[in-house]
Image (cartoon, rainbow, N blue to C red):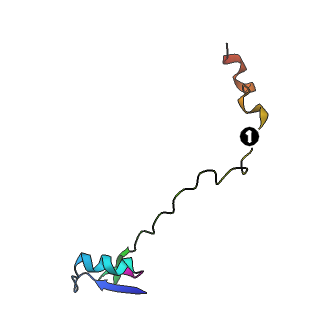
Amino acid sequence: MTITIDLEKDKPPLGDLVEQMLVGVEIVLTKGERPVAKLVAIPPRTPRQFGSARGLIEVDEAFDEPLEDFRDWMI
């Protein structure tokens, strides 16, 4: 659901707008006929799960070997 509020005519309290956003209402602020901002609630973060990428990444055995382009710079 979307609510449009004209800033030149309406001045609703910020607390009321936040309460509406928390229940899923999207609020579009306009100045005259032109939209100038959109207020939406920030979705809650899901907790990270340790080890969720295990087995998805492989590291080549030669990963730690010096690069050929830098052999002259190495002591």
The amino acid beneath tag 1 is Val
Question: Range of the magenta residues?
Answer: 24-28
Residue at 37% x, 78% y: name it.
21
Q: Is residue 33 visible?
A: no
| Image quadrant in which you'd find residue 58 | top right
| Image quadrant in which you'd find residue 4 | bottom left
| Image quadrant in which you'd find residue 32 | bottom left
Query: Magenta stretch mostly in which secondary structure?
Result: strand
Q: Quadrant of the N terminus?
A: bottom left
Q: Secondary structure at mark 1?
A: loop
Residue at 25% x, 76% y: name it.
15
Q: Quadrant of the C terminus?
A: top right
Task: Please state which of residues 68 and 59 is positioned toward the viewer in this rendering.
Answer: 59
Residue at 66% x, 52% y: name it.
53
Give the crowd class for mark 1: few <14, some 14-19, many >=20 residues within 10 Å.
few
Residue on which the image places disc 1: 59
The total of numbered circles placed on residues is 1
Task: Please state which of residues 3 and 59 is positioned toward the viewer in this rendering.
Answer: 59
